[in-house]
Structures are given as C-alpha cells and as structure tokens.
Amino acid sequence: MRHPGALEEQKAQNAGQVLRRLAPYFSPFKHRLIAIGIVLVLGTLADLAAPYLLGVAIDQFIAVPEEGMPLWLSWLVGPDVGRASGLTAVMVTLAVTYAISWLLNVVQFRLMVQVSQRVLLTMRGQILAQLHRLSLDFFDQHQAGDLMSRLTNDTQVINDMFGQGLMRILRMSLTLVGIVIAMVTLNWRLALASFAILPIILAVTAYFSRRVRRAYRETRRTIGAVSAELQENISGIREVQAFARENETIGEFRAVNLRNRNAVVTAETIGALFMPVLEVLSTVAAAVVIGFGGYLVLGFSPPLVSVGVIVAFLNYVRRFYDPIREMANLYGQMQSAIAGAERIFELLDTEQSVKDRPDPGCLPGVLEGRIVYEDVSFRYQEDEPVLDHINAVIEPGQMIALVGPTGAGKTTFVNLLLRFYDVQGGSIRIDGCDIRDVPQDTLREAIGMVPQDTYLFSSTVMENIRYGRLDATDEEVMAAARVANADGFIQRLPEGYQTQVGERGSLLSQGHRQMIAISRAILNSPKILVLDEATSSVDTRTELLIQEALDKLMSERTSVVIAHRLSTIRKADQIFVIQDGQIVERGTHQELLAREGVYYELYMSQFRRQEGLFEPAEAPATGTA
Ligand SMILES: Nc1ncnc2c1ncn2[C@@H]1O[C@H](COP(=O)(O)OP(=O)(O)OP(=O)(O)O)[C@@H](O)[C@H]1O
Ligand SMILES: [Mg+2]
C-alpha cells in the first residue's frame, strides 16, 4: 500500500511547479485579471463595511449619542443631524453598500467565468492536438477512458478551482485580513480577547481539513472507476448480451457504485462533523466578545468600548468563520485540481515516438513507388522480436502479397511502411528516400490504406468516404464508390449516400464497411495501396467484384496486399511468406507451390478449402465451363 504521508509531501512539492506551469494559460488575460483583482478588493471592502456601519448606527443615533462623529459621517449627514434622520442615512448607506457588494460579486464572477472558460478551451484544444500528435505506441499503453477523463474531468477540476475556487480563496484571505485590521483599529483590547480562541479554531480546522481531503480524494478515485466501468459496459454491450452476463455486469457496476457511495458518505460525514464544532466555537467567540466587551464597558469610566463596537465585533467574529470553513473545503478541491493538472501536463509532455525531422521533405512530388525494406527489425515489446532483419524489394507497379500464420507480423510489416511505428533496426525507403526523412502527413497521403479493422465515423456514407480526401466533391466520392463496386449497395441503402452509418459503422454489415473503406482509400488515388485483409468479410461474389475493381487500380500502383483469399494471392507478382519474424519464402504462386515448402503447407491446409469454393465461381468468368 502507498504511504499516504509520502504522497502528500510529493503533492505539496509539485504544487509550486504546477502553478508555474498553469500561469501561462492565464497570462493572456492579464488585464482582465487585474480588473478582477480590483473588483475583488472593492467587494471585500464593501462586505467589511457592513458591520462597521451597524456599529456606527448604534453608537451615533440609537444609544446615547457620542461626542464627535467620524469624519465621513459628518460629511454625509452634517454635524447637527437629528437622531432619526441620521439613522436613516446610515441605513441607506448600509443598503447601498450591500448592493455594491452584490454587484461587484456579479461582475467578478462574470469576468472570471470568461477567463476560466477560455483557459479550458485552450487546454482541451492542446490536449486533443497532442493526442493526434502522439504515435500509436502511446495508445497501446493508455486506455481511451482514462484519456477522455483527462480531457473532460481533469480540465474541469482545474477550471473549477481556478475559475471560482482561487477567487474565493483570495477573497476569503482578504476578508480575514480586513476583519483583523477592522477589529484592531476599532478596539485592540477587544480584538485581542476575540483572537484568544483562534489557535483552537486553527487546530480543529487543520485536523478536519486533512481528513476531509483524504476522503475527498477517495471520492474522485471511485467516481473515476464508476465512469470507467460504465464506459466498458456500453462499449462491450454486444458481448455482455451475447454471453448473457447482464447480471454479473450489473453486480460489478453496483459494487463500484457502492464504493463511491461509501466514499462520498464518509467525506460528507466528516464535513458535517466539522460544521457543528465550528458553530460551537463561533458561539464561544461571541460569548467572549460580549463578556469581555461588557467588562470593558462596566468596569471602566469612561467605558473602554462602546455598545456599537461590540455589535460590530459580534458581526465580524461571525464572519470570521465563514472564510475559515470555506478555505478548509477549498483545500481539498485545490489538491484535486493539482492532481488533475499533473495528469494533464504529463500527457502534454509525452514525446511522440515517431517524429518528423526538422528539415524532412525528401519524397518527390511524383512517386514511382519503389519500396525497399533493408535489414528491418521491429518489436513492440522487449524480448519479443516481431520482424527480424527483413529484406524486401517491391518494384513500382508490382503487387505483392503477404501471407503467414496469424500473429506472424503481416500487419506490422505495413504499419512500419506508414510509420505508425518507426523501425528499430535497418530502414525502409520509398524511391530511395528513407521514410523517416519524409513528413508523416506527406508519406501517409501517398499511401492508401484499408486497415484490417475498418473504422467508420458516426456520420453519413458520403462523409465517411470523403474522409479519404476532404476536398473531394460528391461526384468524386460516388466515382470512387463505383470503382470499388460499392455504389450498388449504397444506392440500395434507405437514404443512399446520406444514410447514417452509426457509431463505428455499426448499422452496416462488416463487408459493407470494408467496401466503404476501400472506396475511401481509392478516393485519394494514392500511388501506393495497402490492403490488410480488405476483403475478408465479403462473400466470394462481392469479392470478385471488388477484385475486378482493385485489379484495375493496382495495375498502375505499387500495392501490398494481405489476404487469405486465393484469388488475390495468385495474381501477385511476389508472395512473401512471413513466419517467425522472417520472410521465409518468396516468389510467385507457382514457384512457391513448386517448392513445396511453408507456402505449400499453408496453401494445402488453409487455402485448399477456398480453392474448392472458388473454382466454380471462377470457371464461368474464364469461360471454360
Ligand atoms: N500494438 C501492439 N502491441 C504489442 N504487441 C503487438 C501489437 N500489435 C501486434 N502485436 C504483436 O505482434 C505480433 C504480430 O502482430 P501482427 O498484427 O503484425 O500479426 P498479423 O500477421 O497481422 O496477424 P493476423 O493475421 O492475425 O492479422 C503478434 O504477436 C501480436 O501479438
Ligand atoms: Mg493482421
């Protein structure tokens, strides 16, 4: 178990750093912040004036009038004012003060919301941009739920803290200082007596705030678990239903929820215990003011304090506790905001592993598409080489097929070509250019990719195809779909190209999703085409249609095809058989069959069945039936 004390210390250390990192987010709003500061001071002064005015009302006009008015008062009402009209004047002043205080509060609130919402916007923008900059290995190691939580929850706690929380802390501190000054100037003897009980208050506050903070942190942790659980539940709803695991899932969710409930109840209970203790202490303080104040009135002639001042003190003492209570609460929030900021900065500081060189720009405008893998090695994890000293040459316009057992590294082979990951040994060159010398977006624009697991965005068919080239017109999109032979099925959809595909394209069949993905890749008319099991989910008839389309396309392009289906592989200029991190065999279909090696074995065990399926379909097409 972690030692809580150690964690606290570490947090405290980082607080300074975190605040320094946060400062630049606020610096563009310097003028507004200064305005807020001024409003804050004025608002606090207005707040503090109220008890004083009450005291003045009593001493000057309600009790036996004192000799000598405060300067401002004689300026306001004149020295010879009657008691009733004097009282009215002070009461009006009091009302105006309250109104000003309220108005300033509103102004301050509004200004601060503007600032903090803009900071939030900047921060979220930065995080999203950073997520897109980061390479795929980062996403291998982080859960989507956690990253989303940084983007939403963590930025939100920072926003809460620095939007309202910090202002409140400042205001409370100012109020405390103001009260102390007001009390000492009004009557230092009574002030000293009122402060006597302060150490007790501070000790109690420190004790409770420590416990509240711990409880508060637990509530945040558990609410995180609740959202994570919920997210998994929704994403995995098909599996849950398919395996009829609803009860178990609901049970697990309930357990996480219970932990959260308990944490919240604990936190609230501690808070609830704290309030009455403060109440008692504030009553004690009031008693001290009245008791000691009374003694100062009765025991001395002339009295050392006036009744009005005692009333003002009673008010100040009562107000003294609000800031303390509030600051104790805010302290927990502050901790959580700092923790949130740490998580955000950690994300923003993560270096991308696939980087563009400062002056890349190697790839020429018009590609030939000659791809060379030279001595390429790669592993996702230490000690588990996936590709081991691979050499391969793909000539322009050639179509090569990758085959090999599941998990052999076929997808990895093409991932490296797109620089989703960088090679760890050797190099990959396109037309003589090391792909690490090419900006990533230039490289990827030159390559059309149909990935193994197609992702469609929840939008229309039209928009999903257009994703291949954003400035494509509707006509171009439809032309691409026709090339992929997807046009037919799209026309038959309820709303044609305007049909919504649902989240991840869940309203379409897997095969249809693949056809959209192929259209998408075609739209960009890339020089190099990469198809990873692109036709694995369509029936053999549809595959023939797609194949026909792709044949046209691939004849003028370099293409790398990963396929289990025979029809594709047979026509390949070269077949690479990948096994145990190596290309163990290479050659054409006929050559490899003749060799009777790994390919032959794979072919016999894996493709033969399909061969049977294909022959009748292919027969009429070749006209030999
Ligand atoms: N992101 C990743 N992080 C860690 N290991 C990975 C990752 N992706 C793949 N691997 C591992 O690398 C190896 C090769 O995976 P790859 O996806 O390249 O296989 P494949 O030949 O495409 O298999 P399939 O025919 O099933 O698609 C596998 O052992 C796999 O477990
Ligand atoms: Mg694969």
Image (tube, rainbow, N blue to C red):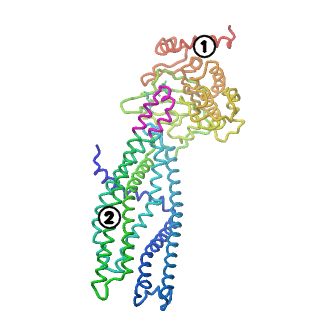
Residue occupying the point 33% across, 51% down: 214
Relative to 365, residue 618 above or below = above
Query: Disc number at residue 280?
Result: 2
Question: Is the residue marked by circle 1 packed among few (<14), some (14-19), or many (20+) residues within 10 Å?
Answer: some
Nearest the eye: 262 or 226? 262
Quarter holding residue 60: bottom left
Element type where label 1 sits in the image: helix
Query: Disc number at residue 614?
Result: 1
Seen from this angle, which residue lies furthest top? 625
Relative to 243, residue 324 above or below = below
| Magenta span | 228-255
Given the image, on which type of amino acid does mark 1 rest?
Answer: Phe
Image quarter in which the C terminus is found: top right
From the Cβ of disc 2, is ligand 1 less than 8 Å away? no
| Horizontal side, residue 380 vs residue 418: left or right | left
Residue 260: % across, % down? 39, 44
Tell me which secondary structure the magenta stretch mostly adopts: helix
Residue occupying the point 49% across, 77% down: 94
Residue occupying the point 60% across, 25% down: 511
Question: Is 439 contained in the magenta span?
Answer: no
Q: Earlier in the sequence, mark 2 or mark 1?
A: 2
Q: Are marks 2 and 1 in contact (CB under 8 Å)?
A: no
Image quarter in which the N terminus is found: top left
Question: Is 231 contained in the magenta span?
Answer: yes
